[in-house]
Amino acid sequence: MPARIAVIAGDGIGQEVMPAARECIDALSAWHPLELTWHELDWGSDYYRTHGRMMPLDGLDELARHDAIFLGAVGAPDIPDTETLWGLLIPIRRHFEQYVNVRPARTLPGIRPVLADDRRVDLVIVRENSEGEYSEIGGRFSRGGEGESAVQETVFTRRGIDRVARYAAEIAAQRHGRLTSATKSNGIIHTMPFWDEVVAETVAARDGIELTSVLADALAAALVLRPWSFDVIVASNLLGDILSDLASAVTGSIGVAPSANLNPERRYPSMFEPVHGSAPDIAGQGIANPIGQIWSGALMLEHLGYGTAAAHLIAGFEKTLADGTSTRDLGGAASTREFVASVRTNLAEIADRFVEQAEGSKEQR
Ligand code: NAI
Ligand code: MG
């Protein structure tokens, strides 16, 4: 049965980078036996302006009938982020127990290095995606009064920490076996020591992983000074959010960073989206960098079992960059469309070569 993909292009540049990624993936199906059906959903801020909500009341039920969710971005300058993010993104992540947020960051060819040192960066941030600092527990008191105050509770559970640490250790085992845990147990004295303890216990249960716990402020500095020294970083919801934007900026631009919101047990659909937001400052100009969306599409293809197609998709935009074509955020002059046209040309070359080699090895046998 074909994989059913729910597509939510969403707001701002989501409407530009989503068609760009779709075009590249559709082009791949000329060479790869991709069985995908796409189901476009017009949810987001325009939907909100008409219906007073970001998605229909039964939106989550509708999404549950899909194998994956491919999302652009949400957020509009005239609607509070509490409505847009908490009306769509966060309910999807929580309802579908997408408790792992995987964010790779690595040096891409042809991108002017941000740092003076040009050693290759290749790291993965595994962010806890369902609890921690992003909780709904709390309130505002004495609004407008002298004693006005706000309280927000951070919630960590043993189950929540254990499962994200286990996933991160698994990824580290498939890579170089080095896992760094972001903490802040010197300042946050209840939840963070608990995080440290459970991460250490979980990782100790697995052979061959070297675990280092690093205070998040020092870790932020280290990500700028020696990002090439990291392999896999596991972090809580808030720390992972901040550190992954930092890591993507260090490797070039937030416009290239992909992410996967995973339900590792596959009981529910996982969601794939670029790290960036709706970028209202450049929306509608046709200059958005589509790499974050395309790379997220590659993570989705991999998740759906199309590893070779995913590798070709990544090689396609890497070759475009290596040839010196890039969008404005990377210092280039290409429009979104020009960039995609070049990726499509490269995909054709890469796939043809792959087919020739496959046939060559058949003949040798
Ligand atoms: P943003 O990521 O939308 O933009 C930050 C800066 O990076 C802007 O200058 C923008 O032009 C640039 N940029 C981002 N993506 C780019 C791309 N693909 N190509 C070229 N340049 C790019 O973050 P910002 O401005 O803080 O948020 C805008 C809206 O997006 C807000 O409503 C925010 O809540 C929302 N947002 C949504 C996210 C999501 O849908 N997952 C994630 C982050 C923010
Ligand atoms: Mg962020």
Image: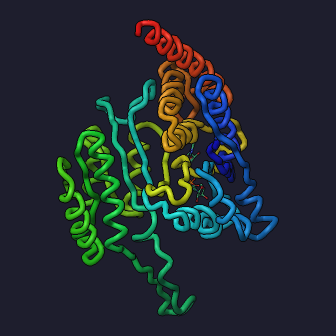
Residue 20 in picture, x, y percent from top left:
66, 35
In the image: residue 269, left or right of residue 51: left
The quadrant of the image that shows the C terminus is top left
Q: Position of residue 158 (x, y in %)?
A: 31, 72
Q: Is residue 243 above or below residue 55?
A: above
Name the residue rendered at 68%, 52% in the picture. Answer: 10
**Residue sitting at 43 percent across and 70 percent down?**
131
Of residue 299 and residue 273, the one placed in the foreground of this image is 299
In percent of the image, x 52 and y 11: which residue is there?
356
Residue 239 placement, left or right of 176 = right
Instruction: Tell me if residue 197 comes above or below residue 218 in the rendering.
Output: below
Q: Locate residue 330, reporting x and y percent.
A: 51, 32
Can you say which quadrant of the picture contains the N terminus? top right
Which residue is at a point 57% across and 37% down the rendered structure image? 294
Q: Quadrant of residue 51?
A: bottom right
Q: Is residue 225 visible?
A: no
Which residue ends up furthest to the front in the rendered image?
Answer: 365
Left or right for 87, reference 109: right
Q: Is residue 308 visible?
A: yes
Residue 264, quarter of the rendered image: bottom left
Of 254 and 44, the residue lying toward us: 44
Residue 123 occupies which quadrant of the picture?
A: top left
The x and y percentages for residue 70 are 61, 48
Q: Of 97 and 254, which appears nearest the observer?
A: 97
